[in-house]
Amino acid sequence: MHWHAYQWIGAGEDRGKEAERRPGSPDFATSALPPMRTGDWLVKPASRMAATFAEVEGAVEWLAAEYGEVRGTLLLPERILPEDYARDALSHGVDCSGANGSRAAGSSPSA
């Protein structure tokens, strides 16, 4: 098994452009927006992958580092996906994703 990591940081209101976020849309592959469903990241071009991991721990470390880079900008840093949850979920084949508003107007990081 392996794990792919994806990241999107952008204006939260942009997530309302649902047509671009669905695989059936002609704009889906080229849209910078994250897909509506986590599994649909795999339909995006491979260039959108931030990293690929052969071990769960590498994926968890990447996730923690990415959140660490933006922690100071988050409105609710306590809502960061806990590492122990991510470790358990990923080891059981469950996708992990998170979203949090930013102190910068209209910005919302998601990993």
Image (cartoon, rainbow, N blue to C red):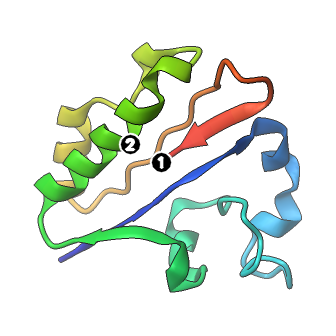
Q: Would you say the residues marked 1 and 2 are in contact, meaning their CB atoms lie under 8 Å apart?
A: yes
Identify which residue is drawn at 72% across, 60% down.
33
**Identity, as a three-letter code, of the amino acid under mark 2:** Glu
Where is residue 57 drawn, in percent x and y? 12, 53
Pick the front one: 39 or 46? 46
Where is residue 7 drawn, in percent x and y? 51, 55
Q: Which residue is denoted by mark 2 in the rendering?
A: 66
Identify which residue is drawn at 45% across, 17% down.
77
Q: Which residue is denoted by mark 1 in the rendering?
A: 111
Where is residue 42 drawn, in percent x and y? 50, 78
Q: Is residue 54 left or right of residue 99?
A: left
Q: Residues within 10 Å of mark 2 (few under 14, many from 20)?
A: some
Q: CA distance from mark 1 to mark 2?
A: 8 Å
Identify which residue is drawn at 78% across, 48% down.
15
Q: Earlier in the sequence, mark 1 or mark 2?
A: 2
Pick the front one: 23 or 12? 12
- Vertical arrangement, residue 31 with respect to residue 106, above or below: below
- Vertical arrangement, residue 79 with respect to residue 55, above or below: above
